[in-house]
Image: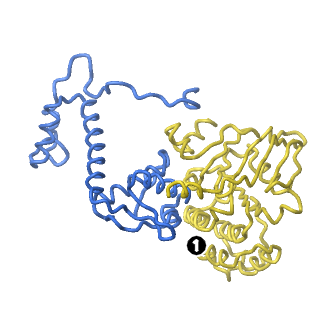
Amino acid sequence: MNESNQAVETGDEVLLRVEHLSKRYLRAQALKDATLEIRKGTVTGLLGPNGSGKSTLLKCIAGLCRPSSGRIFINGRAPGIHTKRQVAYLPEVDPLYPWMTARQTIEFVKSFYDDWDDRKEANILEIAKVDPSMPVRAMSKGQKARLRLVLTMSRNAPLILMDEPLSGIDPPSRSKILNAIVSEYSETEQAILLATHEVSEAESIFDRVIFLHEGQIRLMGDAEEIRKQYNSSIQGLLEEVYA
Amino acid sequence: MRINIDVSMPIYQQIIDEIKRAVARGDLRPGDKLPSHRDMAREIQVNPNTVQRAYREMEQEKLVATLRGQGTFISDDPMLIDKIKREMADNSVSSFVREMVALGFTPEKIVSLVADRIRGLPAGLPGGPPGSLTADLPDSPPGRLPGDPPGRTEQPVGFRSNE
């Protein structure tokens, strides 16, 4: 009985594979030879200071920027028109129209995707405490962040990419966002890659972490094993690595 | 169940310890159902896989049993509470003794302090008259401060030792 339980443990299936990825902008090398795998059922923290290459990596995976070299496979396919429906991407910048209400924004975004899940939408609205009738214009930074979360997590896309979903947001909003992530991601079907430079509050929801520094992966591993090995929180270790 | 997570230690271990404490106290009884790992994860805001890992380890220790489709239950082994209590008492006593020895107390003094404490006599411990602890301090061997630990704890390897 034990064995069968272990077998159904988080799917061993690789959802995302990045091989020797490099990205050069005009002057700057944003990513250098990054290689990683993300398995189904996991929440991975993509950590590092501003400018370490986190956003570039997410954009390349989302198909929004072309790598200079290296390869990306999402369920075996390179990013492009076919992988759009496999990836839900929460950008760092605000894509919301100020004149719409939360409800209108949701309906608008929903119309683009056939994997929208109304049950998830209702749950996340409830957990994240988003008021559907509120116009985006009247929302605080934290309220907008929670609405962006609804837009990203209401889809049944296998791979969810989030770029700084917690930055500059008040602690109650952060807590609501983390709650919504923990309760709504599917451990059997989905994987989350979440980029953040503020680790302390989010670190308890990560299975795995990747430390990026100047475009290179410095450390990658199981969050609990890292705590054990270094006798430190992820945040504490990060501060020492980048000090 | 209230668990205050300290992220500088493995989280699954803290979940296991907290459940053991609840069993030892009698807050959880043999046969009681644990929250689903998802509910537990939501409540303490940790990754569901981490709770799953804690449950799996407890299963291997025979502390809980998972029944397919029904959930995870505290094992109804009648010896369980005793076993857990003994194990936790063992851990507390060893760390207490280690601490006292590191402070320079002799075995006899430790025993008498504990005995005094239990009898409710003022022993210079919290609750006793202020300042009385200094009078109770053992004579430490010369050249060694009472607070000196017997050995330095090992430095973890890796990043931190570099700088």
The amino acid beneath tag 1 is: Ile
In the depicted structure, whether residue A125 falls above or below residue B108: below
Q: Nearer the viewer, residue B42 or A167?
A: B42
Q: Nearer the viewer, residue A176 or A2?
A: A2
Q: Nearer the viewer, residue B120 or A79?
A: A79
In the depicted structure, whether residue B101 falls above or below residue A234: above
Chain B drawing hue: blue
Residue for point 47% across, 68% down: B71
Quadrant (top left/top right/bottom left/bottom right) for the N terminus of chain B: bottom left
Residue for point 60% across, 67% down: A180
Q: Position of residue B66 (x, y in %)?
A: 46, 63
The residue labelled by disc 1 is A127
> The chain drawn yellow is chain what?
A
Label 1 sits on a secondary structure element that is: helix
In the rendered image, which quarter is residue A163 located in?
Answer: bottom right
Q: Position of residue A162 (x, y in %)?
A: 71, 58
**Quick check: B18 left or right of A232?**
left
In the rendered image, which quarter is residue A218 located in?
Answer: top right
Chain under disc 1: A
**Quick check: B12 left or right of A215?**
left
Q: Position of residue A179 (x, y in %)?
A: 57, 65
